[in-house]
Amino acid sequence: MSKNNDFSVKNLDRIILGSLSKEKGKRSKVVIRKEYVGLRHRDLPTLTFMTIEYGHSFEYILDQVNIQEIMNLSDGESIEIKDSQNKKVVCTRDGDLVIFDSPEHSTVIEVPFDEFTIKGEPLSPEEIDKAWRENRRRLFKSKEAEEEFDGINSSSLLEDEVEDADIEKIFEETLEQVILESDFLAIDRVSTFEEAGVMSNNKGLVINVRLLEDLDTGEVYDGPFEFQLTIVQRR
């Protein structure tokens, strides 16, 4: 997890003028992807990670500490953070936008402020670090368990587990992660039916997409678009 150096900007005009001397990035080239860690573990908080890409030129990778710090910015406030690549960047809130200005890049980009959201309640840096370490520990432990069962006939055990498991819920969580990690979709947000308040007894996902590209023709269609995927297990 990254550690950030917070600072208060006394001369905001100087920061803005410095940003204006750089090239302003095109909004259409900014792509945001979110990844959630810990969705499977009900007893652990879900951590949010966010990748902000500017075409194929550069990217910022933010952990939940970064995201929460940006969420707390008031209009006109700035903060200097280090992303997960140890890249320094000054983030300045300008109304409904957040301006990203790094000394490593000659282009300044703008990201909508409402993109900076997390699942659940805000956590302290210590709580985030603890949840991250526990998720990693369980991940490695599950991999070790898989290796132990490799080559062993455990079909009866698996049948019992399947009967007790919420298969549709597991598939919903897996599909959500696959969609969020997709390089083919400009995802704004993915929510479960429950999170989005969809009145349905089925499991499913609500997917908000900023734009769509026809993979055959290369034509790009500007959104936003919203799709609903209903998940029903075939019996």
Image: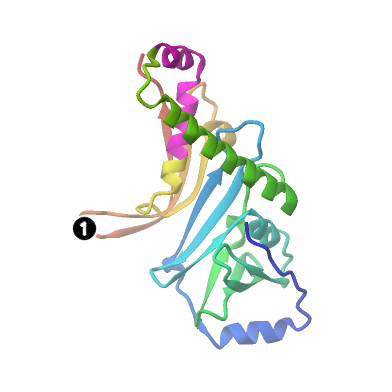
Q: Does the magenta-highlighted stretch encompass residue 80?
A: no
x, y percent for residue 163: 47, 12
| Placement of the N terminus among the 4 image quadrants | bottom right
Instruction: Please name the predominant secondary structure of the magenta segment in the image.
Output: helix
Can the viewer see residue 78 in this picture?
yes
Q: How crowded is mark 1: few (under 14 residues within 10 Å), some or many (20 or more)?
A: few
Q: Seen from this angle, which residue lies furthest left?
A: 216
x, y percent for residue 52: 50, 62
User: Looking at the image, which residue is at 62% across and 46% down?
Assistant: 132
Bounds of the magenta segment = 156-176
| Placement of the C terminus among the 4 image quadrants | top left
Q: In which quarter of the image is residue 214?
A: bottom left
User: Looking at the image, which residue is at 77% across and 74% down?
Assistant: 8
Give left or right: position of 36 versus 210: right
Q: What element carries label 1?
A: loop
In front of the other: 196 or 9: 9
Q: Does the magenta-highlighted stretch encompass residue 172?
A: yes
Can the viewer see residue 226 in this picture?
no
Q: Which amino acid does label 1 sit on?
A: Thr
The residue singled out by tag 1 in the image is 217
Give left or right: position of 107 versus 153: right
How many marks overall? 1
Q: How is the image coloured?
A: rainbow
x, y percent for residue 204: 47, 31
User: Looking at the image, which residue is at 72% across and 81% down?
Assistant: 12
User: Looking at the image, which residue is at 35% across and 53% down?
Assistant: 184
x, y percent for residue 58: 45, 71
